[in-house]
Amino acid sequence: MPIPDYQSVMLPLLRLAASGPEHRVREAVEKLAAEFQLSDSERAELLPSGTAPLFDNRVGWARTYLKQAGLLTSPKRGMFQITERGRSLIAENPSKIDVALLDRFDEFRSFRMRRREGSAETSGEPRTIGTLEPQQELPTDQTPEDLLASAYRRLRSGLELEIIEQAKAATPAFFERLVIDLLVSMGYGGSREDAGRAIGKSGDGGIDGMIKEDKLGLDVIYVQAKKWEGTVGRPEIQKFAGALQGQRASKGVFITTSSYTREAIEYAGIINSKIILIDGQQLAALMVDHNVGVSTVGMYELKKLDTDYFEGE
């Protein structure tokens, strides 16, 4: 089943809290994962930042919102317990707990107001008190990390499309330099000077050049890198594989601005030579990952509470 959003976690978490005097956060996460019947792969899924498991993060936000509404409290580090208000709410037997329900509590409305005011101050936007609906402040199925990840994916997707368009429009000589810059940034080719001498100089049977696999040159990788108007088919990969055999080479990289046919991909997977196929979409993603042809316009540092700091209070 899909990983539940943070609001779907609220009611099961509050019910769990009502089942005993105190609960460990870590144990609660495992119990809730079992209740939602999450698979091992779902439990292992991380936030886009890679900093924490996605489900754990959503349980954490559910707990935060319940605490802000006065339904849970934290008696000590790593523990939580239900309050009398929380027990009263459970006694009502609600079908679900979400932001709209929590909005009945003054403390929670104050918490959301502080968040809105902080956002307005940070962004420079005018503050309009009491006019923002719950779903405008935080979509019902998304945590702040979800929102950041969604925005990042949209921005990155647009950037990658721009890169592909620019690469297709570039001259063959510029595209060659682009490939050199990328391979060197990824740690191949030794120095840029070495890679520049190696790429684009062979032209031997479908090979555009060869680069060092590492800075010491313990092995070499042969490269075919060309802009392509249509889809690259199996014959082109066969030609490249034959050229590798002629060089007694076992490793090659085929880079194109377009894509590959299914037959080409299948062929590259069954031959003895190790040929990596990089299409236009992968090329753009690698360029972003290795800062080739892109620049940083801003950085946002996310921080969380250091509980160890407060433990000795």
Image (cartoon, rainbow, N blue to C red):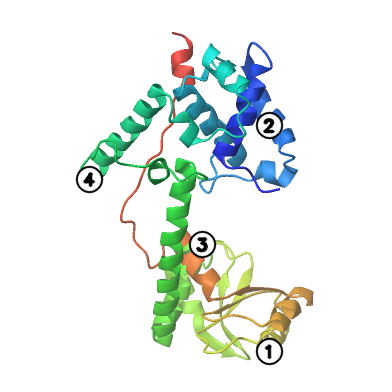
Instruction: Report helix, strand or loop for mark 1.
Output: helix
205 w.r.t. 90: above or below: below
Of the residues tagged 4 and 1, which is closer to the observer?
4
Location of mark 2 (residue): 32
Please, what is the three-letter code of the amino acid marked with disc 2?
Leu
Location of mark 4 (residue): 125
The Cα atoms of the two marked residues, 1 and 2, are separated by: 55 Å
Please provide percent x and percent y for residue 310.
Answer: 44, 15
Label 2 Cα crowd, 10 Å radius (few <14 / some 14-19 / many 20+): some
Location of mark 1 (residue): 239
Instruction: Report helix, strand or loop for mark 3.
Output: loop
Q: Residue at x 55, y 69 (%)?
A: 282
Please provide percent x and percent y for residue 104.
Answer: 43, 27
The Cα atoms of the two marked residues, 4 and 2, are separated by: 39 Å
Dot placed on the residue nearer the N-terminal end, 1 or 3: 3
Please, what is the three-letter code of the amino acid marked with disc 3?
Met
Label 4 Cα crowd, 10 Å radius (few <14 / some 14-19 / many 20+): few
The Cα atoms of the two marked residues, 1 and 3, are separated by: 26 Å
170 w.r.t. 187: above or below: below
The Cα atoms of the two marked residues, 4 and 1, are separated by: 59 Å
Dot placed on the residue nearer the N-terminal end, 4 or 1: 4
Q: Which quadrant holds residue 121?
A: top left
The Cα atoms of the two marked residues, 4 and 3, are separated by: 41 Å
Q: Residue at x 64, y 17 (%)?
A: 18
66 w.r.t. 124: above or below: above
Tell me whether the residue at label 1 lies in contact with that at label 3, contact meaning CB atoms closer than 8 angstroms: no
Please, what is the three-letter code of the amino acid marked with disc 1?
Lys
> Is 46 in front, or is 89?
89
Dot placed on the residue nearer the N-terminal end, 4 or 2: 2
Label 3 Cα crowd, 10 Å radius (few <14 / some 14-19 / many 20+): some
Location of mark 3 (residue): 186
